[in-house]
Image: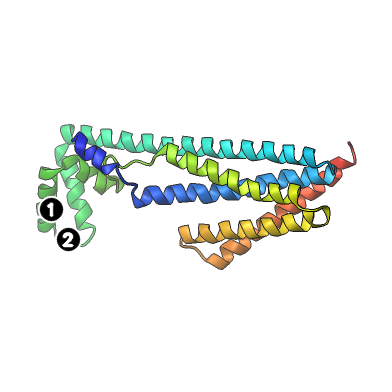
Amino acid sequence: MMKLFHKKHQKLTMDEKLNNLRAGVLGSNDGILTVVGVLFSVGVATSDIYTIFIAGLADLLACAFSMAGGEYASVSSQRDTEESAVREEEKLLDTNFTGERQDVVDYYMERGISEETADEIADDLLSKNPLQTMVSVKYDMEIGRYMSPWSAAFSSLVSAALGGTLPLLAMTLLPNDLKWPGTIVAVVIAVGLTGYFSALLGNGLVKIAIIRNVIVGILTMFIHYFVGIIFGHFF
């Protein structure tokens, strides 16, 4: 049993890969928007590059670790729920096998299979691997195939840091006459890419996702720009 368990964990499932990619896309998008928000607010209030860089870097690190922590907590909670469901099915197989068998029969009958054939399928599956059968029928899960919170957290951490690095470098390294337009262009391209990948992951409309992300990015820059102007007058 342990050999089978380890064999199953040698490779990531498609769901695990997609979950890590999803965490990466969301982390990258948040990294871009949060960092550029701070850069615009601080950049308007002061022209000191060192101050702008430190503020942007501090926000980048905070965002990256916050995203990683949130992703770890979320996936850990999901994993705990899945493991709890497996334990519950294990108890039900011992205490209410007839009810569990009927659930399998009903599952196949709902998919157009005759009651007689559904009975045969249920008996066959439950005689071979009763726990996996019940988990698959009720929760569409595979025992031992749980999302890795560490993998999702790492993906989110790295992508958020990389996403925030782009506007940070543009704002602090470009010449003064290119600093603002260069950062705006960099952000528009970056959020457009995250919109594109999020649409692919969610089977959504690519054009709409890109436009939506670009609009959010522009609004983020616009709002924080004026926040910087307002607070710049007081300090």
What is the three-letter code of the residue carrying label 2? Ile
Between circles 2 and 1, the one closer to the viewer is: 1
Query: Image point 29% across, 43% down: which residue?
Result: 10
**Which of 174/145 is in front?**
174
Q: Quadrant of the N terminus?
A: top left
**Which of 137/67 is in front?**
67
**Which of 178/147 is in front?**
178
Q: For this view, does 193 lie left or right of residue 73?
A: right
Q: For this view, does 206 lie left or right of residue 81?
A: right
Q: Position of residue 89 (x, y in %)?
A: 24, 37
Q: Position of residue 16 (x, y in %)?
A: 38, 47
Q: For this view, does 192 lie left or right of residue 17?
A: right
Disc on res. 121: 1
Circle 1 crowding by C-alpha within 10 Å: few under 14, some 14–19, many from 20: some
Q: For this view, does 9 lie left or right of residue 205?
A: left
Query: Image point 26% across, 41% down: which residue?
Result: 143
What is the three-letter code of the residue carrying label 1? Ile
Say which element carries label 1: helix
Q: Earlier in the sequence, mark 2 or mark 1?
A: 2
Q: Position of residue 185 (x, y in %)?
A: 71, 60
Query: What colour-coding does the image apply?
Result: rainbow
Query: Image point 69% across, 46% down: which residue?
Result: 168
What residue is disc 2 on? 113
Relative height, residue 187 to residue 149 (above, below): below
Say which element carries label 2: loop
